[in-house]
Amino acid sequence: MSKSRAGVYFMVILAMIFWGFSFVAYKIAFESFRPVSIVFFRLFVSIFFLFGFALLFKRLGKIRGRDQKWFLLMALFEPFFYFLGEAFGLTLVTATVGAVIIATIPLIVPFASYYLFRERLTPMNYAGLVISFSGVMLVIFNRNEGFSGDLKGVILMFLAVFSAVGYTMVVKKLADRYNPITITAYQSLYGMLMYVPLFLLLELPFPDLSLLSSRSLLAVTYLGVMGSGICFIMMTIGIRELGAARANVFANLIPVVAAILSFLLLGEAMPLIKILGIGIVVLGLLLSQLRRLRIRSARRGADIYHLPES
């Protein structure tokens, strides 16, 4: 393996570690911010990084008029509904449970693609879904107490999952005309604009700034800069150099990282059954990617996968 290729692998793994920490950052941000405020400020920060990066490297494309409706629909799925589900869901479930549920996105995308585009499903797709879903059940279900978090929180996290699937289906229509940076930059911009009414309605009057903890401010900044900015750039480089399927395999690290950091930083319980469940989720994801279903674009044959942004 060349040094440059090893560096790309290191970059992708680092992105997954940072994304895994995002679930912990949400919990810290909740000390001072309500969910909609977290998402609004996160998107506000990420816009500067994504547009700045795109303009610096001359990668920002111009949106055609006929594609505006698809960009708006994409932003409605994600970040609008996705972050609503994730941010509110994480107020009711642990960071570990949330990360494990979000990790099922790559499994559901092939089934949506089959329904909408008649893409062929392989036995590995079915096996991976069944095995990983079994692992999710072990993580979110406690034998003595029932669900590890409020059932509403689990449902909200799955709202984020299915929103991400809808996002991926829309991206399929745009990926042959726009580069990933352009898509994500405008996705964040339109998403933030969609959050303005919610922010004004639900978050004002804003809490006294003197009461904001430095930890929560750093957490929100981290979510914008790393979770929605630098990590995406690193993952884009990984997809370009390694291919989408190979780079996406590393997304299996996210729930593992989230579980370890939640245990170390938040004091979340880590019983054996939860460790077993995480392992089963990762196994199912790995099996499903041995024969990944590919969504081909009409002109370039590019593989489209949902980035595990969180």
Image: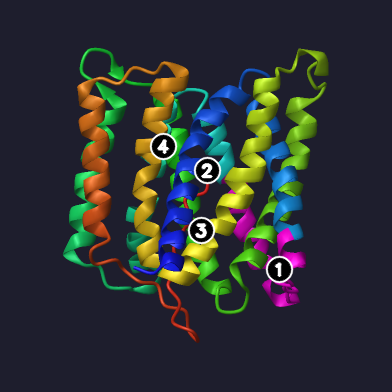
**For the residue labelled by badge 3, is the local secondary structure a helix, a strand or a loop?**
helix
Q: Secondary structure at mark 2?
A: loop
Disc 2 crowd, CA 10 A, few/some/many (<14, 14-19, 20+): many
Disc 2 target residue: 310
Q: Does the magenta portion include 62?
A: yes
Residue depicted at x 33% and y 73%: 118
Q: Residues within 10 Å of mark 3 (few under 14, many from 20)?
A: many
Q: Which mark is residue 99?
A: 4
Query: Dot 3 corresponds to which residue?
Result: 235
Cα distance between the residues tagged 4 and 1:
32 Å
Label 4: few (<14), some (14–19) or many (≥20) C-alpha neighbours in 10 Å: many
Q: Which three-letter amino acid code belongs to the residue tagged 1?
A: Gln
**First-in-chain label (1 vs 2):** 1
Asked if the magenta segment contains residue 59, the reply would be yes
Residue 61 % position (x, y): 72, 73
The first of marks 2 and 3 along the sequence is 3
Up-down relation of residue 273 to residue 279 (above or below): above
Q: Whole-percent x and y of residue 104? A: 35, 47
Labels 3, 1: front one: 3
The reply to whether discs 3 and 1 touch (Cβ–Cβ < 8 Å) is no
| Residue matched to label 1 | 68
Is the residue 10 above or below the residue 145 in the image? below
Residue 87 located left or right of residue 54: left
Q: Marks 3 and 1, how far apart in space?
A: 25 Å
Question: Which residues make up the magenta segment?
Answer: 53-81
